[in-house]
Amino acid sequence: MSGTTLSQFFLALALVLGCAKLFGRLARLVGQPRVVGEICAGLLASPMVLSPDLVAVLLPGEVKPLLSAVADIGLAAFMFAAGYELDLSVLYRRATGSLGLLVGSILCPLALGAAVALFLADQYAPANRTAFVLFVALAMSVTALPVLVRILADRGLNGRPVGNLALGAAAVGDLTAWVCLAGVVAYAGGTGQVKVLLLPLYLVLLVIARPLLRSAVRASLRRNRTGAGLVSAMFLGLMLSCAVTEWLGIHFIFGALAFGAIMPRKELAELRGSVPRSMNQIGQLMLPPYFVLAGMNVDLSAVGVSAVAVIALIVCTAMVSKIGGAYVGARLSGIGHAEALPTALLMNTRGLTEIVIVAVALDAGIIDRTFYSVMVIMAIATTAMTGPLLTLFTKAPEDSAPAPVLGERAKSIE
């Protein structure tokens, strides 16, 4: 790597981080999640706004892969923290308490999403029509858990019936979405389809690794009560897990999520704040370029009026299916209108979870660049609408409960 390329990389990284921070702060000032501002910063640097020549000056071709690598490390750290924060026993209790809401918020978007995908497959499916339909159905059913937690904290809904319902359903729904996405990516995986047969072996190794990790953590804490060195060791394991799942032909985010999920929480109870905080610091620094680059990849300049109609169709389908399905499911399970409506509105936020999912689908060749752009715009629109719709149809409580641990993480990475 030449000195010129390295210099361009550092300048481009500084520019991307600066723009992400600026636009993220502007988004927060208008009551929107930070990720919306970061994606908008990328949109302003996309071919729809700037000429290709100017983009090449700001972000040279040889620098972009380096920025993507930095962003991928940030994404891996974020997914590790997401897996670490998943308390499956709590999620199970919440899911059983809001089964109707959970089923409605998933099944209705899946059904309507599949119907829309069948209509659009001839135009937008690059290769595998079935994988395209499965992906669109899955993408419609997503709720962004970190953004949702931040909204709950901002509006004092933590620990309240509405917040508990939405959080429990979104957590179980997100976990289901990641598992299903792994299956879709494996199905569409081409060369990775043979290697993916080794996935059960990887899962067995994770099960074996958990008690070994517990013993290692106990030994480390006996030597040093501050747990010095644990974060470095966890980061090493995270990179290895990401490498294995990427080699299997799935995606490294599943390795990051799984490795975070098997972390021994009881043994790390004294460090429960510092361990995710360390990963958050990595993610907070390195993840924003991921969303800026996601915005830069959006390009609808070469398509006509039909693209506007497709965007409107996708956004309307996403909102109607998610809000409608969640509301009807909640009502059928005996939840009153006063709780069912705000909960359904909360379930409509998609945020960074949707962005990551559509980026994975683009990398896997399940969708093309144009449809990727459509889905990113849908993610921004549904996320941006959540706050105003809550303000319009609900009233925040006068007092608020403290944010949970996941809420603290969502404050820095949304």
Image: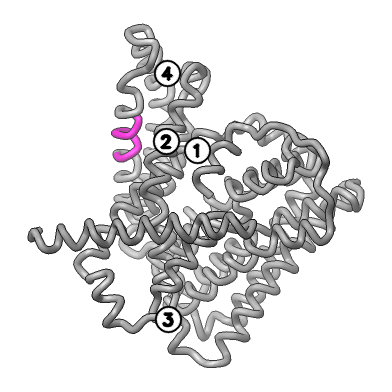
Cα separation, mark 4 vs mark 3, equals 51 Å
**Label 4 near label 1: C-beta < 8 Å?**
no
Q: Residue 224 at x, y = what percent?
A: 34, 10
Q: Label 3, on which residue? A: 49
Q: Is residue 184 above or below residue 308?
A: above
Q: Is residue 203 above or below residue 44?
A: above
In this rendering, position of residue 396 left or right of residue 187: right
Of the pair 66 and 87, the residue shown nearer to us? 66
Q: Main secondary structure of the magenta part?
A: helix
Q: Residue 104 at x, y = what percent?
A: 76, 56
Q: Mark 2: which amino acid?
A: Phe
Nearer the observer: mark 4 or 3; the answer is 3
Q: Mark 4: which amino acid?
A: Arg
Q: Residue furthest left?
A: 2
Q: Which residues are magenta?
A: 234-239
Q: Label 1, on which residue? A: 83
* Picture quadrant where residue 66 is located: bottom left
Q: Label 4, on which residue? A: 214
Callout 2 secondary element? helix
Callout 1 secondary element? helix
Cα separation, mark 2 vs mark 1, equals 7 Å
* Picture quadrant where residue 211 is located: top left
Q: Earlier in the sequence, mark 4 or mark 3?
A: 3
Q: Label 2, on which residue? A: 259
Residue pictured at 40% horizontal, 71% vertical: 296
Q: Mark 3: which amino acid?
A: Val
Callout 3 secondary element? loop
